[in-house]
Amino acid sequence: MTKIALFPGSFDPFTMGHLNTVERAALIFDRVIIGVFTNTTKKALFDAAEKEKMIREATTHLGNVDVLQQERKLTVEVAQELGAKFLIRGIRNTQDYEYEKNIALMNRHLDTAMDTIFLLADEKYGHISSSILKEILAFGGDVSEYLPEAVNQALQNRGLSHGE
């Protein structure tokens, strides 16, 4: 039986922390699908197609990882359609855990065969989030060390990053 996991998120922008989580999940699962979902409560830097393209570029070294966009379905519905029995979530701190735990419990209620796997953030990425990086970018700060090259390049193309 192939073990398929879905890593859902808005990924705006996709960070080195996200990439680290995907790389680690790719060692555990036969197939990892990164689901680019829309978060209606956040103002996005990139549209879903742009995010999908950047994430594909950032994960080309991972043969068992794919990327898809999804805007109008529940995460568990997408996972079911893909044959994924596992959801991947990165956890940086206790606040993340409490938030993600409640979502995991609800997803388990919606699909009793669905398990959420929490991967603790690597120490060097535990302090970053897409929201924090967007705030730094808004004030002209350099966040290039926290972004895969494809994402940093896209930000530079928009005049939003001062990276190399």
Image (cartoon, rainbow, N blue to C red):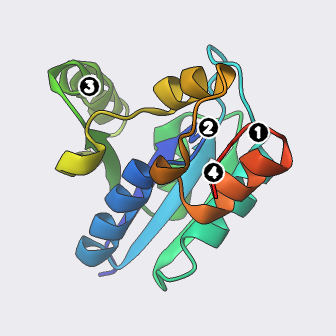
Q: For this view, does 99 lie left or right of residue 46?
A: left
Q: Are marks 2 and 1 in contact (CB under 8 Å)?
A: yes
Residue density around tag 2, few if under 14, some if 14–19, many if 20 or more, within 10 Å: many
Q: Position of residue 23 (x, y in %)?
A: 35, 69
Q: For this view, does 153 lie left or right of residue 133?
A: right
Q: Position of residue 119 (x, y in %)?
A: 21, 50
Q: Position of residue 27 (x, y in %)?
A: 26, 76
Amino acid type at circle 4 is: Gly
Residue density around tag 3, few if under 14, some if 14–19, many if 20 or more, within 10 Å: few
Choose between 155 and 46: the one closer to the eye.
155
Label whose residue precedes the other's in the sequence (2 or 1): 2
Q: Are marks 3 and 1 in contact (CB under 8 Å)?
A: no
Question: Which picture quadrant has residue 39?
Answer: top right
Alpha carbon separation for disc pair 3 and 2: 17 Å
Alpha carbon separation for disc pair 2 and 1: 7 Å
Q: Label 3's element?
A: helix
Task: Determine which residue is flagged by label 2.
Answer: 12
Numbered tag placed on residue 119 in the rendering: none
Q: Label 1's element?
A: loop
Q: Quadrant of the C terminus?
A: bottom right
Residue at x 29%, y 33% (from the top left corner) = 127
Label whose residue precedes the other's in the sequence (3 or 2): 2
Task: Determine which residue is flagged by label 1.
Answer: 46
Q: Quadrant of the N terminus?
A: bottom left
Foreground: disc 4 or disc 3? 4
Residue at x 74%, y 32% (from the top left corner) = 45
